[in-house]
Amino acid sequence: QVQLVESGGGSVQAGGSLRLSCATSVYSVTQYCVGWFRQAPGKEREGVAVIEADGITRYRDSVKGRFTISRDNAKNLLYLQMNTLKPEDTAMYYCAARKLRCPTTVVHGSVDEYAMDYWGEGALVTVSS
């Protein structure tokens, strides 16, 4: 069973930065599509950014230019660098993995639990104005 553990969440003022990390138990992150998702109170879960096995990245329009997804192939770690944070970025952020290529729509609209094969427990990010 694949395990994903997020860390790095916290509270920050608007305009600030945070970096989320995700430790994975997969044999190699280069064999999965891995990504970050978020869910704000009262809203549906949405895809934020994913990185495919071949390294291709995709971002939600609202975070383009502010967030950067990356991975450490040797350590099987996934990161999300979040800059210029806005109050609307406040949410629980989840790390997730999928054995097959991620659907191209994963960073558009909302997603359900079946969009990815494995999910972490989440890390809370709170951005105050």
Image (cartoon, helix red, strand yellow):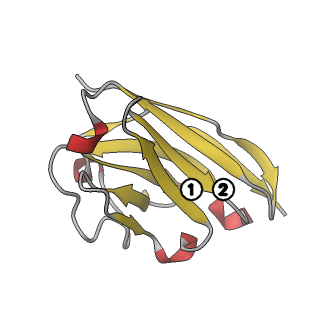
Q: From the viewer's side, name the closer residue of 80 and 89.
A: 80
Residue 107 is drawn in which quadrant? bottom left
Q: Please give the label number shown on residue 109.
A: none
Circle 2 packing at 10 Å, graded few (<14), some (14-19), many (20+), is many
In the image, farthest residue toward the bottom: 61
- Circle 1 sits on which residue? 40
Q: Residue at x 43, y 57 (%)?
A: 45
Q: From the viewer's side, name the closer residue of 87 and 53.
A: 53
- Circle 2 sits on which residue? 90
Residue 11 image offset from top left, x and y in percent: 77, 45
- Sequence-earlier tag: 1 or 2: 1
Q: Is residue 64 visible?
A: yes
Circle 1 packing at 10 Å, graded few (<14), some (14-19), many (20+), is some
- In the rendered image, the quadrant that contains the N terminus is top left
Q: From the viewer's side, name the closer residue of 87 and 18.
A: 18
Q: Amino acid at mark 1?
A: Ala
Residue 89 is drawn in which quadrant? bottom right
State if disc 2 and disc 1 touch (CB < 8 Å). yes
